[in-house]
Image (cartoon, rainbow, N blue to C red):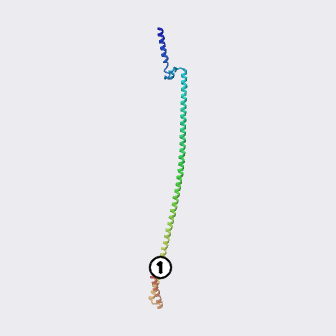
Amino acid sequence: MKNLFFIFVVFFISFIFIGCQESKYQKPYVMDDATRIGVNPNSLAYIAEDKAADRKNQLALKKLETDAKVTIMKINSQKDLDIAKLDAQTKKEIAHANVTVKKEVSQRNFYIALALIIILLLALFLWYFNNRKNRELQAKLEEQRLNNSLMIKARELEHERANKLLELLGSGKLSTELETEIIATISTQKRQNCIQHK
């Protein structure tokens, strides 16, 4: 019995050590279906299979990463293309707006210049017409002044002549026929002067 007891203790201790083969440098493993069905997680086949699965997962992860990068690059290139299109469209619209504004400004300037020319011509016409009327009025006034001056001189001359005739009549040196003729001439002149004044 001692032998049996000794075998039993050895067997029990070895069994415990077999289950505790993990060291502090190895990752602890989680029991999965493989360990439940009797696969040893420390066996080379399991480790190789695990490494293959890790490689597969890493390849899938890298593929996902590259797909994500490609998708991001496509989105960025599409965004850049859209921005370039919007920029080109905006520049085109700005150029079109500038052309339209320039046309409107040139058209407005043309109409302003045309209006200024018409106003200038109208002002010149009014100035000419006003000056012409002023010149005509001044010419008429000058003519009236000259006529008045001539009339005054003519009256002065008639008055002097009449005074001389009256002096001659008053001197008595003239004949009676001449005196009657002079008196008739003086009286007709006075009548004509009265008619002219009326």
Q: Number of numbered discs present?
A: 1
Residue drawn 55% across the image and 34% down it? 67
Amino acid at circle 1:
Met
Q: Is residue 166 above or below residue 4?
A: below
Judge the density around disc 1: few (<14), some (14-19), many (≥20) Cα neighbours within 10 Å. Answer: few
- Secondary structure under badge 1? helix
Q: Where, quadrant-wise, is the C terminus in this rendering?
A: bottom left
Residue at image point 49% right, 15% down:
15
On the image, the x and y values in percent for residue 106 come to 53, 55
- Residue 119 horizontal/vertical position (percent): 50, 62
Along the line of sight, which residue is nearer the eye, 113 or 166? 113
Q: Is residue 197 above or below residue 132?
A: below
In the displayed structure, 137 sits above or below 120; it is: below
Judging by the rendered image, the residue that carries numbered circle 1 is: 151
Query: How far across and down, in percent of the image, does residue 58 sit?
Result: 54, 28
- Residue furthest to the bottom in view is 176
Q: Position of residue 109 (x, y in %)?
A: 52, 57
Q: Residue furthest front?
A: 37
Q: Name above or below for residue 64 compared with residue 112.
A: above
